[in-house]
Image (spheres, rainbow, N blue to C red):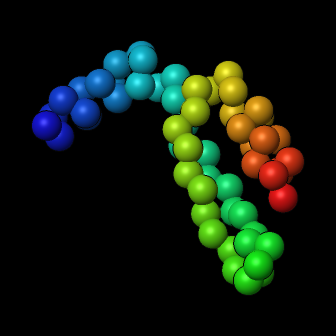
Amino acid sequence: MAKKVVATLKTGTGKEYSKVITMVKSPKTGAYSFKEAIVHNDHIKDAIAASQENK
């Protein structure tokens, strides 16, 4: 299975996506947590803006 994943990431389709990690503060406790999302490279700014609006 790992060979298949590595093979798809080396092709052109795997390079079109990036992992976006945003830090979110909990309103109840004040603790920080991290949200991860795999986003197409064209929509990275939209994903970051959406996470900042949810504060």
Task: Give the total number of marks visible in the rendering.
Answer: 0
- Counting from the top left corner in percent of width and height, residue 46 is at 77, 32
Left or right, residue 49 beside residue 22: right
The correct choice, above or below, for 37 with respect to 25 in the image is: above
Looking at the rendered image, the quarter that the C terminus falls into is bottom right
Task: Give percent across and percent down for residue 31.
Answer: 70, 80
Q: Is residue 55 left or right of residue 10?
A: right
Name the residue nearer the viewer: 47 or 14: 47
Residue 47 against residue 35 in the figure, above or below: above
- Residue 42's image quarter? top right
| Residue 1 on image: x %, y % | 13, 37
Q: Which residue lies furthest to the bottom in this view?
A: 29
Q: Residue 48's quadrant in the figure?
A: top right
**Is 37 or 54 nearer to us in this picture?**
54
Direction from residue 37 to residue 51 in the image, left or right: right
Percent x, y for residue 3? 15, 34
21 above or below 14? Answer: below
Q: Residue at x 86, y 48 (%)?
A: 53
Foreground of the two, 17 or 10: 17
Q: In this view, does 35 lie to the left or right of 51?
A: left
Q: Furthest residue to the top?
A: 12
Q: Which residue is drawn at 41% across and 25% down?
A: 14
Tell me the residue at 25%/33% (across/down).
Answer: 5
